[in-house]
Amino acid sequence: MTRNCLAGLFTLWAAGTGWAQAPASPAQPPTSGLVLPVVAPAPAEAVQGRWSPRPRLSDGKNFSIELRAKFQGDTAKFSPVVDSDDEGFVWRRRRLGVRGELFKRVEFEVEREFGDEEEPWRDVYVNVKAHDLLEVRGGKFKAPFGLDNSTGSTSHDFIFRSLGTRLLAPGREVGGMVHGQAKGSLVTYALGAFNAPSDTRTADPAFFDDDQGAASFDRVLSGRVTVQPLDGVKSLPRALRNLEFGVSAAKSTVPRGENSIKGKSVFGYEFFDRVYVDGTRMVTGIDVALVAGPASLKAEWINSADERLGQGVGDVDLSKVFGRGWYVSGSWLVTGEKKDGTVPKRPLFQGGFGAVEVMARTERMLFGSSEASGQPPSTSPRGENLARNHDDVLTLGLAWHLNRWVKLQGNAIHESFLDAARAPIAGTATYWSYVTRLQFAF
């Protein structure tokens, strides 16, 4: 509007001062004298705002910016109780951020977690799109790895990600990545290099929460490729054409010392201690997902292996220590909405009840050494044949989507440990946890 007004005032001023003369109307003969053509200014795209689904400003072509927020609060009860401090209410996330786009080519995001003084910044990056097949991203963001790890925290079926993802997958860090996709999302790829998290150089780094990933050392190379092999088969139902397979890998080095990944339960209780390592850490994963109308089925397997070069008696090499996690999960929107569509279709207080979803997941997180030997199993951090321990987890869930911004979740979590002596409470192998979450996000 301002631009149009200034252009109009300039045209009137120019005509009145002799610099330009307005063209005659068709009913009048042309006027004599110098006449400069007056080109009408192109209409400017007015900046417009909207509130739904989130606050957003845009001029339609060259610029857009939107506000994003995530608030999640949890309450938990346990049987038996390992630590009473874990019961009660806790803020899981309090995040505010902005996401924008310039000229349909440049995207940016800045996101901050409030209440986290040690690591307040989450996603802070710029992404440049040269082509569908080539985009370049730099800044701080999550490394490309795995299906569970790539799913946003507000879109996740369960309150917590799988243990394999939380403990083994690389998390957010400063780095760069190239990525792209072919024919929509028939094939996607992402490959990045990231700095090591600054607080994981010590022998016992702080436990990462469910969307920060596991501890890594030195520079991390991480990549992921997905393919939908049936996408182009028009004769198949749309549900089967959604079938997607993914392959991921990450490589880094671990410093010499007691620096392997520590086995931790859903609520961070230890069941497998660190051992001495030195060399390369290699993490690999495969996953599959099928979304069919109101239902989804997902499965994933992740394996991490740390070398133990020169860590045995007499500086001999020991077998690799591994962490291995897998899960199979399913979900169903009882009220009939499509998983990849608008949920809910009929919000609460707007002619409907919202959407109700049920889900279940079974998983295992296993630690041990990769090669069996004639030596007896050992819990020593320099043992050749490390005594294995695993946590079997069953999660049953219920979610109520009141509207597109508010969701109420409940999860009942059963954990069972192979070695009860190394369970959270020595001698007690099984545990129940009951968690509820109220989420507000846009």
Image (tube, rainbow, N blue to C red):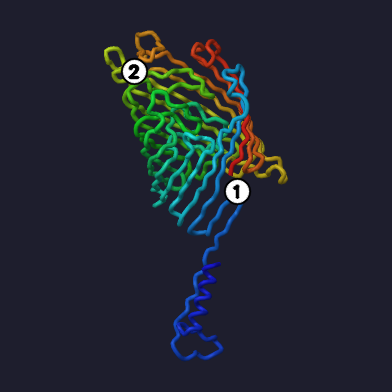
| Residue drawn where x is 50% and y is 70% of the image | 42
Q: Taking 233 as reference, is 419 above or below it?
A: above
Q: Residues within 10 Å of mark 1 (few under 14, many from 20)?
A: few
CA distance separating discs 2 and 1 = 53 Å
Of the image marks 2 and 1, the number of the one nearer the N terminus: 1
Q: Residue at x 39, y 14 (%)?
A: 386
The residue labelled by disc 2 is: 319
Label 1, on which residue? Answer: 53
Residue at 34 percent across and 34 percent down: it is 219
Amino acid of disc 1: Pro
Relative height, residue 202 to residue 125 (above, below): above
- The three-letter code of the residue at mark 2 reads Ser
Q: Secondary structure at mark 2?
A: strand
Residue at 37%, 24% in the rendered image: 305
Q: Residue 226, which numbered label?
A: none
- In the picture, residue 282 is in which quadrant? top left
